[in-house]
Image: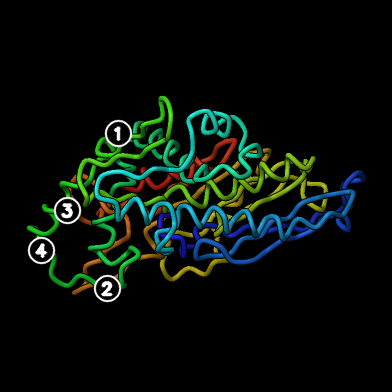
Amino acid sequence: MRTLTTIAALVLLFQACQNEPDAPASSYLVAEGKTMGTYYRVTYHDSLNRDFSREIDSLLVAINDEISTYIPESTISRFNRAESSLDLGLEYKDFAECLEDLNRCAGVPNTHFLRNFLAARVAYARTNGAFDPTIMPLVNYWGFGYTPKRAVTNADSLVIDSLLQYVGFDKVTLKADDGPVLLLKSAPGVQLDFGGTGQGYGIDAVADYLEWKGIKNYLVDIGGECRARGLNPHGKLWTIGINTPKSEAEVTDFTRIIQLKDMSVSTSGNYRNFYEVNGQKYSHFISPKTGFPEKSTLLSASVFGKDCLLPDALATGFMV
């Protein structure tokens, strides 16, 4: 989850005996493609047969343009390079309106970034700091970030200690009380990483767009995380499989099959994105307290909720 190439759950449409009378399978459409280093697949029912694939793809591109650390001129990359602050290019009144309804944010800059920031702040508080988006310098050090991939063969505790001084969400302050909205940092080395919220946010953004268009039956899946509403093409609840948390498991091996009734689910695990050095396993979950990859017997965590953004962040926090 935190690393966007990880597939934590595979969404399946299981066969049923009969279709829903008001929503036959033939009136379901599918939009799919690549985003955030993984796949997306959106299945929805529309009696008007409207094709939203272009709008969905454009929305996901716009989100990436603000929160991807792999895009040099994204909002988050510009903040990470900034010495002390970043002007987010909008006034407080516009920001407040967008918080209420994302679909009213057309033309307002950096609202995707700000929504991820605010959700991360909630998750940081609820996990007592286990979920901390300022972990970016250490994610890079251990070879899981936007810098060139590498396996750390001899960890330097002095370097790790020096990077820990930049970790802590209290080192980032949002100034949004009046006038221009600014994001401040306590030191140039402070950096953000929204890898733990991006997929969940993208799912919610697409789902909210569909609902804005009057769609009531849909499944939005990005990299195995998903949000479901209504019924599938067979008139049944949407059914998903949670991947077996073993590195040798196939993506079609499930530890549990679950039906979703107007719910979202996000799964995070340490069994896909890791490397080994001298028999020692290093996962991409970095402790914001020690600066080292987390060692835990917990293999995966699944979090359910009405929407997907907060479960995405919490599932990451529970793995630390």
Identify the mark nearer the N-term, 1 or 3: 1
Nearer to us: label 1 or label 2:
2
As shown in the figure, which amino acid type bears the numbered disc 4? Asp
Q: Which mark is residue 128?
A: 1
* Rendered residue at 42%/34% (across/down): 180
Looking at the rendered structure, the kind of residue marked 1 is Asn
Q: Is residue 29 above or below residue 176?
A: below
Q: Which residue is mark 4?
A: 156
Residue at screen point 41% across, 55% down: 2
Q: Residues within 10 Å of mark 4 (few under 14, many from 20)?
A: few
Q: Is residue 255 visible?
A: no
Disc 4 and disc 1: Cα gap in Å?
A: 27 Å
Q: Nearer the viewer, mark 1 or mark 3?
A: 3
Mark 1 vs mark 2: which is more N-terminal? 1
- Residue sitting farthest toward the front: 179
Residue at label 2?
A: 150
Q: Which residue is mark 3?
A: 163
User: What is the quadrant of the N terminus in the image?
Assistant: bottom left
Q: Earlier in the sequence, mark 4 or mark 3?
A: 4
Dot 1, crowdedness within 10 Å: few (<14), some or many (≥20)? few
Provide the secondary structure element on which disc 3 rests. Answer: helix
Residue pushed farthest right?
Answer: 21
